[in-house]
Amino acid sequence: MKVIVTGGCGFIGSNFINYLLMDPNEDIEIINIDLRTYAGRGNNLDHMELKNNEKYKFYEVDISNKELILEIFKNELPDIVFNFAAESHVDNSIIKPDEFLKTNVIGTLNLLEASKKYPVKKFIQISTDEVYGSATQESFDEKCKLSPSSPYSSSKASSELLALSYYKTHGIPLIVTRSVNNYGPYQYPEKLIPLFITNLIERKKIPLMWSEDNPGSNIRDWIHVIDNCRAIWFLSQNGKIGEIYNIPGMNEKSNLEITKKILDKFNLDDTWIEKIPHRKGHDYKYSVSGSKLTKLGFQYKYDNFDKHFNEVIDWYKENKDWWDKIKNKTVVFGNGYLGNRISKEFGFILTNTNPLEINKLKKFLDLERPSIIINSIGKTGYPNIDWCENNKDETLYSNVTVPLILAQECYKRGIYFIHLSSGCIYEGDNDNKGFSEEDIPNFDDSFYSKSKIIAENILKNFPSLILRIRMPIDNIDHERNLINKLKNYNSVIDIPNSMTYVPDFLKVLGILLSKKAIGVYNVVNPGSISALDIVSAYKENINRAHNFEVMSLEELNRITSARRSNCILNTNKLKKEGIYLEDIKKRLHDCLRDYKMK
């Protein structure tokens, strides 16, 4: 049997695929169609170790793309279609309803058209109890009228009616299921239960919708995701074509009850609750009757709510490797030297999205929903900062406009923003003290330095982390590594400077990121070295045939368009954070040792 599952990378869809593939009694080939929008980016099937299953095939396709859907149906000729694909977060539907109509209605239409052209044996439309609206007294049965309250539930009701019309008009062998709230493993951590659990694991408060009239009293019915998957499969095999079936959990709980169960599991009290306003049109209660389902003979397996709920809490405790990268998704802008180093070191997403293309940037942020953004975009010049003197527009765009745009968009969305800046905004050693983060920049004799000063002054108005790096040396072979730059020069100067050992910078970044630190930090190694120190050590340890000359600062200024900053920064602020770095001379030795080994 060949089965198409749409939305198979999401919470319920991936659990459904896992349930079918792990059943030894079923001989099923599964084709998963999923665009992998933000809620499908958790790599659930990878984590379940199903991605390479010989009975599994994946298409990364938008179901609203009719042409591609028809092509897949033509090639695969499925027996059954399970349409799980949906935008489902109610709050998001209130802000951006158009995306919900596109996926939930147009996408369903395309699947129905494909099922009509390439006839299927059954089409299972997965819906929700939210289409009934808020319950008053009695539980809703399948004959009750629909009264959706949000753009999300309206789009699901619309897709249901559309699907039923294809049954009546075109004879599509259709069954509609209306499930209650699911709980279980692999649920995207924006939903109530995984959000609350993971927040408490991270020692953060939990946001409960609250008012004096309604102190977290909203009631939902909860079903374990595997029982929901079992019920959907059961109905595909035993349900009557053209019928609608509710799938309740028979575990009606108020949001406050759920909250207290989670707090109790963590041995925490109500002070961990952060009271937030109710959303617009917040339905008070969902309640559906499941008599039609049970009369067919379906039996629940996960019927001890307290036991299985605690097992789910334990699952999130034991699988932080799955949810942490989703909940705290970090995106790096700028695919240059440092952007690539950061991305590879931490496994962060590296994007080519150009922040100057505002609409594309907003779409990217809405799709990916990162929690953290690191900006490593910046012009330092080709081959050096002299380039910036003759390319001022490009320098301003990269070094000032880009960080400003990113900071603004992050601020609007509550995204933690980190900007990589430069220490090349000072001159001298500040009377042997080194320049602190609070000292006013005193060097603007290059356009590059001016652009960095402007950017910092603007970004200080945002809750951002600004990391000043200086003349980075590294233990890898890269053209932007200062060691590689200097070994190609015929002449160098002998003026001491603060410098940054890149592996130490990555260490500092990780520490400050974990603390969600705000403000400016000098990320340089203690001590100072000169360009002459570096090439001399290179000649002694790596290439004894290397030749160079020493020039004065005056000679350097005569042959360059922009003056160079030579300065010493202090690292007292890092030390106050408990971060102590090795002296830069020791780190230069480490770099050259690694070079020699390679």
Image: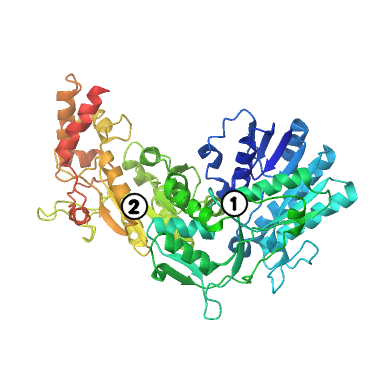
Q: Is 272 on the left-hand or right-hand side of 143?
A: left
Distance from Cα at disc 1 to Cα at disc 2 = 37 Å
Of all residues, the one furthest to the right in this rendering is: 169
**Of callouts 1 and 2, the N-terminal one:** 1
Which label is found at residue 514?
2
Quarter that holds the N terminus: top right
Q: Nearer the viewer, mark 1 or mark 2?
A: 1
User: Nearest the camera: 527 or 495?
Assistant: 527
Q: Does residue 261 lie above or below 327 as drawn?
A: below
- Residue placed under numbered mark 1 in the picture: 302
Quarter that holds the C terminus: top left
User: Nearest the camera: 420 or 137?
Assistant: 137
User: Nearest the camera: 144 or 570?
Assistant: 144
Percent across and percent down for residue 305 are 56, 57
Question: Label 2: few (<14), some or many (≥20) within 10 Å?
Answer: few
Q: Is 572 on the left-hand or right-hand side of 393?
A: left
Residue 492 seen in the current view? no
Q: Secondary structure at mark 2?
A: helix
User: Nearest the camera: 497 or 228?
Assistant: 228
* Total marks placed: 2
Residue type marked 2? Ser
Residue 279 seen in the current view? yes
Percent across and percent down for residue 406 are 45, 55
Of all residues, the one furthest to the left in this rendering is: 432
